[in-house]
């Protein structure tokens, strides 16, 4: 430390004490250019998805035999597809399927994984051994292969794809929660809570859960990115969103057959997936740094 | 070989024994998980398996053949018995044993996976070294952008874009198909280089991040400081002293990316029409060939578990501090 920064330290300390942890994390997050870029891009896509009927220039499923595979023009900014549908409209409506799949499947994974992880980490013993081995077994199956197998047996639909991705993501959250609980439960404040006679469920929910939220938040952000890729992959294979409803994955599948005559069909949906996933990864990385207590 | 005689050796044996003993319940749950997939099939599985066939005699035969008339635990015991004897059932579609199908397709995916890992190391490790050595510079920034790109690009989109560029626009490489290296190694290389690059790209990004953080840690260690104090050239410090130690975690962590590789193979093989393991499972899904799906998932999981174990053991063997 140089002499010049020494005077600044106590001030920064006071500021840190006055701020709530969430505020501090947000302030640090907003200092990172990558994370800010990510937040902006995600907000744009969320707005597009929410207001798709107002924003989209055409009906995404309206076919037209006179407009088949038109290159980008002033009427159709991103061109049209093999059935004469507007690619821009389909990319905008496709955001709905992708974002919804990301949010819902990670929601499923959180709502199954976190309680199981809390139970496993806090109770220990036989329950822990059983949950841990089942988690190991699920983690032994590569994520996408497990999701494909589940979706195949459940039957092809966007809803089933979300369930398949959610279930395949669950073991990550069980393991993360369990590990975090093991770290936190030996802390003095948990001991103290136990000593005053709090019931177990109260200690788990009121004293342990809030302290593992940062780690869960970071993982959830990164998992949404993975889930969006997985949904696109399943839709690409025909196991997700069913035609004619638009999804970025199924648009890419159709585009592959017309790469020679209509390459624009392949560029935009892929770029959309890339941008959303990149942004979520940027925000996830930024959150990890912002929430890290070692980095003041 | 002092540590062989010490109690560290016993500790290590104990650890290995425990680690291997844990495999048994894990494999048991894997088998239950894969078996119960079948229970997810909506409606009567015999009807689903029969497909278009509506003849009651055929359906009754399927029911008897797969023991669907028996209680579920009994079905499971029969299934596991078969699996343990290497019998994964037979494909509904072409009546071939699932084991034979897997044995046919696995070498193709292994070739792709091997090439992908080579590509990933060739890109990821140097990028990681440069970004750690030149931390905070444009080089570091560029390497981090590359890593983000690699992690965020859906591999099926990258594959389609490569086909567009190298096959359609430039006409340098075949867009699809597969040639065995035994037949013609040049044609084989041409047919596999794009899918291998697509697979390796994501892993290169992950290896770059691991290499970077391992190198940063090692470069601050005492022995690197000593090497610097001795007046060794920076080049020799980085490549001889630091890299050797930094690579250990990178290699073991890299082994864990096998799951990424196998998951990626599913779509990559589909896009490039490579007749490997990934294409097998996709085709099986479309043909409702459930025995094949189960067999593929089971074999993948077993390979993955085994490689994890090997990575753990390798990590202990090369890291003296963990020996006890």
Image (cartoon, coloured by chain):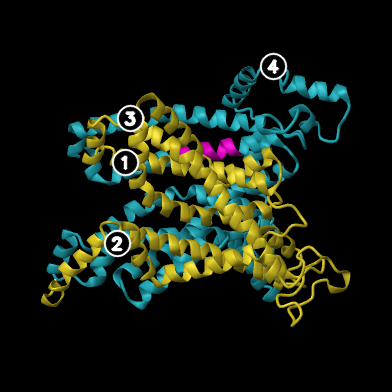
Chain ID, cyan in image = B
Q: Position of residue B97 (x, y in %)?
A: 69, 32
1 and 2 marks on the same chain: no
- Counting from the top left corner in percent of width and height, residue B62 is at 78, 24
Residue that badge 4 annotates: B70
Chain of the residue displaying label 4: B
Q: Secondary structure at mark 2?
A: helix
Q: Nearer the viewer, residue B77 or B315?
A: B77
Does the segment drawn in magenta span residue B303?
yes
**Residue A25 horizontal side relative to residue B170, left or right:** left
Mark 1 touching mark 3, by CB under 8 A?
A: no
- Residue shown at 52%/54% (left/top)? A224
Q: Quadrant of residue B269?
A: bottom right
Disc 1 and disc 2: Cα gap in Å?
38 Å
At horizontal 75% and vertical 71% (from top left) the residue drawn is A260
Front position in the image: A120 or A193? A193
Chain of residue at mark 1: A
The image's mark for residue A207 is: 1
Q: Give, as a single range, the part of the protein colored magenta.
A: B297-306
Query: Quick check: A189 above or below A222?
Result: above
SS at mark 3?
Answer: loop
Whether residue B307 appears in this view of the structure is no
Q: CA distance from mark 4 to mark 3?
A: 45 Å
* Image x and y of residue B252, in percent: 38, 49
Which residue is denoted by mark 3 in the rendering?
A199
């Amino acid at each position: 430390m140089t002499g010049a920064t020494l005077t600044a330290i106590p001030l920064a300390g006071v500021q840190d004490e006055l701020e709530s942890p969430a505020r501090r994390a947000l302030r640090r997050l907003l200092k990172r250019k990558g994370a800010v870029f990510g937040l902006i891009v995600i907000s744009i896509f969320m707005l597009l998805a929410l207001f798709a009927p107002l924003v989209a220039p055409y009906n995404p499923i309206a076919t037209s035999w006179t407009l088949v595979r038109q290159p980008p023009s002033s009427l159709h900014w991103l061109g049209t597809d093999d059935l004469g549908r507007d690619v821009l409209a389909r990319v905008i409506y496709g955001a709905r399927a992708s974002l919804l799949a990301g949010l819902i499947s990670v929601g499923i994974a959180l709502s199954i994984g976190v309680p199981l992880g809390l139970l496993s980490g806090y109770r220990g013993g036989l329950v822990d051994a059983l949950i841990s081995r089942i988690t190991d077994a699920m983690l032994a199956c590569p994520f996408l292969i497990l999701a494909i197998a589940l979706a195949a047996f459940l039957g092809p639909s966007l809803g089933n794809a979300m369930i398949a991705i959610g279930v395949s993501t669950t073991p990550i959250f069980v393991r993360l929660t369990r590990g975090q609980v093991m770290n936190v439960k030996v802390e003095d404040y948990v001991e103290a809570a136990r000593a005053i006679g709090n019931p177990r469920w109260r200690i788990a929910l009121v004293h342990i859960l809030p302290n593992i939220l940062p780690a869960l938040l970071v993982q959830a952000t990164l998992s949404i990115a993975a889930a969006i890729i997985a949904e696109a992959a399943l839709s690409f294979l025909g196991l997700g969103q069913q035609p004619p409803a638009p999804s970025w994955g199924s648009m890419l599948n159709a585009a592959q057959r017309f790469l020679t005559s209509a390459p624009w069909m392949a560029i935009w949906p892929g770029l959309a997936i890339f941008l959303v996933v990149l942004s979520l990864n940027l925000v996830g990385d930024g959150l990890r740094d912002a929430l890290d207590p070692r980095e003041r | 070989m002092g540590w062989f005689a010490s109690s560290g050796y016993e500790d290590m044996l104990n650890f290995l024994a425990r680690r291997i003993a844990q495999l048994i319940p894990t494999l048991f749950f894997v088998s239950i998980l894969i078996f119960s997939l079948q229970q997810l099939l909506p409606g009567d599985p015999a009807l689903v398996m029969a497909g278009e066939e509506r003849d009651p005699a055929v359906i009754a035969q399927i029911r008897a053949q797969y023991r669907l008339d028996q209680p579920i635990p009994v079905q499971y015991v029969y299934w596991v018995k078969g699996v343990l004897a290497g019998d994964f059932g037979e494909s509904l579609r072409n009546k071939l044993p699932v084991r034979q199908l897997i044995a046919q397709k696995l070498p193709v995916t292994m070739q792709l996976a091997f090439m992908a890992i080579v590509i990933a190391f060739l890109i990821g490790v140097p990028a990681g070294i440069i970004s750690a050595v030149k931390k905070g510079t444009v080089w570091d920034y560029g390497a981090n952008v590359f890593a983000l790109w690699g992690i965020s690009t859906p591999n099926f989109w990258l594959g389609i874009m490569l086909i567009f560029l190298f096959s359609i626009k430039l006409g340098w490489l075949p867009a699809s198909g597969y040639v065995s290296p035994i037949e013609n190694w040049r044609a084989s290389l041409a047919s596999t280089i794009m899918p291998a690059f697509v697979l390796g790209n994501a892993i290169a990004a992950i290896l770059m991040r691991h290499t970077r953080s391992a190198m940063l840690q090692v470069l601050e260690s005492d022995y690197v400081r000593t090497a610097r104090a001795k007046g060794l050239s920076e080049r020799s410090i980085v490549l001889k002293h630091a890299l050797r130690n930094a690579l250990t975690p990178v290699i073991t962590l890299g082994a864990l990316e096998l799951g990424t590789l196998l998951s990626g193979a599913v779509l990559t093989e589909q896009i490039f029409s490579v007749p490997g393991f990934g294409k097998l499972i996709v085709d099986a899904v479309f043909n409702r060939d459930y025995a094949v799906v189960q067999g593929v998932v089971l074999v993948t999981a077993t390979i993955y578990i085994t490689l994890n174990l090997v990575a753990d053991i390798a990590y202990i063997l090369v890291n003296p501090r963990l020996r006890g």
